[in-house]
Amino acid sequence: MKLYPAIDILGGSAVRLRQGSYEQSTVYSDSPLSAAEAWAEAGASALHIVDLDGARSGAPVNLAVVAEIASAVEIPIQLGGGLRSADSVEAALAAGAAQVILGTAALTDVALLERLLAVHRDQIIVSVDSRTGIAAVEGWEQSAGTDALAALTALQARGVEKLIVSDIEVDGTMEGPNIAQIIATAELLTIPFIYSGGVGSLAELSVIAELQLPTLDGVIVGKALYDGAFTLEEAITALEGGR
């Protein structure tokens, strides 16, 4: 199971939001590039990058920064944030993203999703971020009015090959992951998914690993790494079950 260090870019800095709120952001580095290089040097096998400016505006804002990161590190990048058109997806891939993350577009524009899957199926990840079990869109600020688990089922049926699931209510809080959500998702899906939200300790990562869920590909961690709750190396070991 992989660990995906998170780099969320807002106003040119690497930040973390609390519960998806732009009003509750903490700056951890003035240089997202430096953060990416640090995680890569520490042993990360992939990076999870979100263009928060893009997520809120509806179009990518920080592709130049992403291109710098892609040129500087030799590990794959998954990129999300504001990718709501075919052109923006093509631009993200051209900037060096190995995979692109669709959120709002995948839930609100089925025709676009189908066109993108036809061309870039293995490079498309869809993220379903939920608040009280309901999918959120528009940079996590609006409700899609759709049950999150129902959304996951529909996306799998449409041919999406990989998903991200997150619980906005615990995201950025370090108050613990939503284990019930992880288990429910694993019981529902036959395709791989990544979990994000609330991880604050190595013990919690060990609990997730011990579930031994075959479709759970990995865990995204941000605040706990930046705050020094554990090192990236310790987190990787915990997800590998100490092996």
Image (cartoon, grey):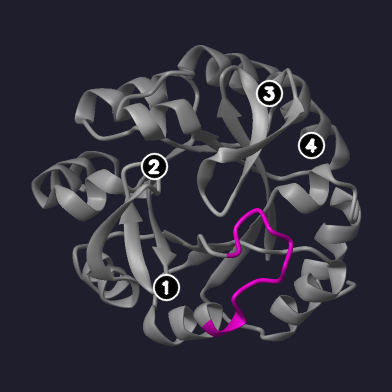
Residue type pointed to by label 3:
Pro
Residue found at x 33% / y 69%:
134
Magenta stretch: dominant SS?
Answer: loop
The image quadrant where one finds the N terminus is bottom right
Magenta residue check for 216? no
Q: CA distance from mark 3 to mark 2?
A: 19 Å
Which mark is first along the chain, 2 or 3?
A: 3
Q: CA distance from mark 2 to mark 4?
A: 25 Å
Quarter of the image where one finds residue 219: bottom right
Q: Amino acid at mark 4?
A: Trp
Real-space CA distance between mark 3 and mark 1, rounded to the nearest whole angstrom = 31 Å
Residue at the extreme left: 111
Three-letter code for the amino acid on which mark 2 is drawn: Gly
In the picture, measured across the screen, residue 235 lies left or right of residue 85, that is right
Q: Which residues are magenta?
A: 170-180
42 vs 74: above or below: below
Identify which residue, 12 or 19, lies in the foreground: 19
